[in-house]
Amino acid sequence: FERVSQYIKDIPTTISDLFSFLLDDWSEEYGKMFVEDVTGLICVSKDGLLENEINDLLAFKEERDRGNDEYLYDSSFSRIYDSLASFLAAGGGGYLRFFHDQLKYTVKDKFLTAEFALETNKWLSDFFFDCTKSQLCEEPQEDPPAYYEHVLQQLIYHQLKSYTKR
């Protein structure tokens, strides 16, 4: 009971402090790198990401960055989705983005250094380009992902963002 009372007393009184508190809480629960990656993806995406795109992006990074068969983290978006769901809006087509701009600003302040933003845009660019590779022939042998049109819309944007410092 005393721990609950202390937890309630520690809850911040401003929106940005509350979001910072939540990001810290999620980082403890799910791992800092995982929270940074998930919130960073949502934050820098051009107009949101589908849930299956986020899962595929996390798996892509896991495959790309894994060394000695070690895993970076449990790369399933669903394990953090319940915590984030209240702060996400599914716009047209189900693309997830932050519902409250202040959460986006807090993620930027807390995690998105210029270098991390460039790396995240590069990650998105590499992933979207990888999705197009199997379709770059006269008669593709495999079907594109269900979100292929979104891939094409995002690819150039993230290529430009991954090489442009702003």
Image: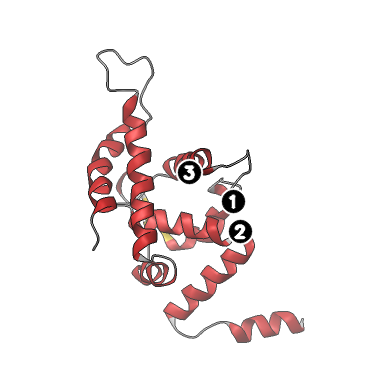
Residue in the image at 32% along x and 35% along y: 129
Disc 2 target residue: 30
Camera sees residue 139 = yes
Residue 118: image location, x then y, percent: 33, 56
Residue in the image at 38% along x and 39% along y: 127
Screen quadrant of the N terminus: bottom right
Mark 1 surroundings: few (<14), some (14-19) or many (≥20) residues within 10 A: few
Residue in the image at 37% along x and 14% along y: 141
Residue 70: image location, x then y, percent: 63, 43
Asked if disc 1 and disc 2 are in contact, CB closer than 8 Å, the reply is: yes
Outermost front residue: 68
Indicate left or right for 88 with 164 as reference: right
Q: Secondary structure at mark 2?
A: helix
Indicate left or right for 135 with 31 as reference: left
- Three-letter code, disc 3: Lys
Residue 91: image location, x then y, percent: 32, 51
Screen quadrant of the C terminus: bottom left
- Three-letter code, disc 1: Arg
User: Which mark is first along the chain, 2 or 1?
Assistant: 2
Mark 2 surroundings: few (<14), some (14-19) or many (≥20) residues within 10 A: some
Disc 1 target residue: 79
User: Which mark is first along the chain, 3 or 1?
Assistant: 3
Camera sees residue 98 = no
Q: Nearer the viewer, mark 3 or mark 2?
A: 3
Q: Secondary structure at mark 3?
A: helix
Residue 37: image location, x then y, percent: 47, 55
- Three-letter code, disc 2: Tyr
Disc 3 target residue: 61
